[in-house]
Amino acid sequence: MKQSIKVLISGGGTGGHIYPAIAIANELKLRYPNGSFLFVGAKDKMEMDKVPKAGFDIKGLWISGIQRKLTINNLSFPFKILHSLWNASRIINKFKPDIAIGTGGFASGPILIMASRKGIPTLIQEQNSYPGITNKLLSKKAQKICVAYDYLERFFPSEKIVKTGNPVRQDLLTIHSKEEQAKAFFDLDKKQKTILIIGGSLGARKINQLVETNLDFFKNQQVQVIWQCGSMYHDEYKKFNSIENVQVHQFLNRMDLAYAASDIIISRAGASSVSELCIVGKPVIFIPSPNVAEDHQTKNAKSITDRHGAILLRENELQTFPIVFETLLKDKGKQEHLSENIHELALPGATTAIVNQIELLLKK
């Protein structure tokens, strides 16, 4: 196999597509220090900022999804597709990759379609328990499909599927030795329980509203709150930093320490978050977003809650939150039971397993 490889990676739109792509690139870079790496994303999406910060070059395509409602943007969709396919072809011809990898998001469609047409091996990494339309279409031509959940042969050719799990931050593997450091980092009272609330990098309105409504309830329960409200909502909620035992953060740069400090976690159910929380092994209340394609967050959460590894609370059930939370907080046996069950579902070697599959394709 060549010691200097060229790898084309496409994935974006959300952190759930971007961070797995970066993790795969980092692992490949360790194995091939002289390799060349190029990312392709959607213009004006967060990957155009996050990928360069991770140390990789990125090109942007003029591409977006179809809106569910009839909008003027939908009229430009066919033109965006044709323009992106043409640009993807130009990028591939100039870069000459040995392999193309897609982790989901709109830009991965044109890139992997054109790579397949040019005879370049392609690999898809599907994070969710219910795949999006892009990966369903790409699966017909891809050589390998790395998945994180069982039963995806309903959507993909079974002979191409390899269950690897989702790439996660490697610093999460050692969080159980970081509890003291984490409590000091967040300036927490060691005698009190700590609740971590995470709604994704942009934030989750319903979760933020839930927390705001229950600040007095948390005070009465004598718990400390680390509240990641997201970049869209920080200006609205940062005023609550003045409340004792409440910390409001736009973004948590040390997620390993946030997880290590927590006793109970309240979270959305994006694929990357679910995979991380399996490794973390703390009691979790999932509040999935109902506003995502195919309601895949609920399906992700159910893959854990059906195995008694977490609690599922839908947005239309949030009025029951105080009862659900207080019951869990006071039941140590339930907490231990959830922790053990979710931890059993962890796949900590996902990045290594995916890159092993990439190497097998490169050898061919």
Image (cartoon, rainbow, N blue to C red):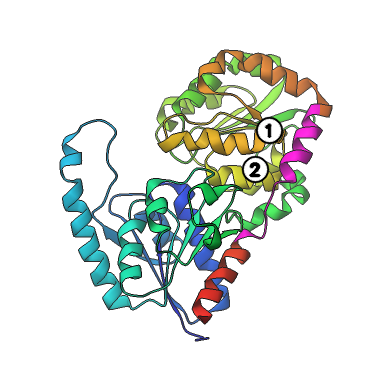
- The magenta region covers 334-350
Q: Nearer the viewer, residue 336 or 361?
A: 361
Q: Which mark is residue 133?
A: none
Residue under the image location 70 percent in, 54 percent down: 173
Mark sitting earlier along the chain (2/1): 2
Residue 323 among magenta residues: no
Image spot of residue 317 (x, y percent):
55, 17
In the visual, does 43 lie left or right of 137?
Answer: left
Vertically, is 56 above or below 229?
A: below
> Residue 310 got which mark?
1
Q: Residue furthest right?
A: 333
**Residue shown at 41% from the left, 51% from the top:** 136
In the figure, is residue 316 to the left or right of 42? right
| Whole-number angstrom distance, CA of label 2 to CA of label 1 | 10 Å
Q: Regarding mark 2 in the picture, which secondary structure is present there?
A: helix
Q: Which residue is mark 2?
A: 277
Give the secondary structure at mark 1. loop
Q: Residue at x 47, y 24 (%)?
A: 206
Around disc 2, counting alpha carbons within 10 Å, would you say few (fewer than 14), some (14 to 19), or many (20 or more)? Answer: many
Residue 11 at x, y percent in the picture: 41, 56
209 w.r.t. 152: above or below: above
CA neighbours of label 1 inside 10 A, class few (<14), some (14 to 19), many (20+): many
